[in-house]
Image: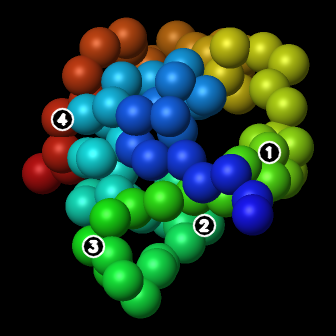
Amino acid sequence: MEKLLDTDALADLLGIATATVRNCLSDSPHTLPPRVILPAAPSKPLWRLADVEDWIRALPLRTTPSAAAALPLSSSQKRGRRLPAP
């Protein structure tokens, strides 16, 4: 039988907090690997290790801290919080 990961094990593997995994499950499940739903425990989130490894391999590699950070600011742009347009 294939190894299944619970939220704690997934968080350890991804290097994030368990609370972050739980928050993502409720707020944005599309940002996590595909999960397994067992008929005997449909509310317990579980992941196949192989699925998680495939998901990680499919993530894009980031060569810079962020694409937005690499863009120079124009002289009319200021740093800081943006206010909504009137």
Q: Residue at x 75, y 63 (%)?
A: 1
Near mark 1 (Cα within 10 A), the count class, few <14, some 14-19 or many ≥20, is few
Q: Is residue 42 left or right of residue 19?
A: right
Q: Residue 67's quadrant in the figure?
A: top right
Q: Is residue 74 left or right of residue 71?
A: left
User: Which residue carries the number 2 mark?
Assistant: 34
Q: CA distance from mark 3 to mark 4?
A: 40 Å
Q: Is residue 57 above or below residue 77?
A: below
Near mark 2 (Cα within 10 A), the count class, few <14, some 14-19 or many ≥20, is some
Do the CB atoms of the residues marked 1 and 2 lie less than 8 Å apart? no
Q: Residue at x 61, y 28 (%)?
A: 13
Q: Earlier in the sequence, mark 3 or mark 4?
A: 3
Dot label at residue 53: 1
User: Which residue carries the number 4 mark?
Assistant: 83
Q: Amino acid at mark 4?
A: Leu
Q: CA distance from mark 2 to mark 4?
A: 36 Å
Q: Earlier in the sequence, mark 3 or mark 1?
A: 3
Near mark 4 (Cα within 10 A), the count class, few <14, some 14-19 or many ≥20, is few
Q: CA distance from mark 3 to mark 1?
A: 23 Å
Q: Earlier in the sequence, mark 2 or mark 4?
A: 2
Q: Amino acid at mark 1?
A: Glu
Q: Is residue 72 above or below residue 29?
A: above
Q: Is residue 12 above or below residue 31?
A: above
In the foreground, 58 or 41: 41
Answer whether residue 55 is visible to the viewer in this image. no
Q: Amino acid at mark 3?
A: Ser
User: Which residue carries the number 3 mark?
Assistant: 43
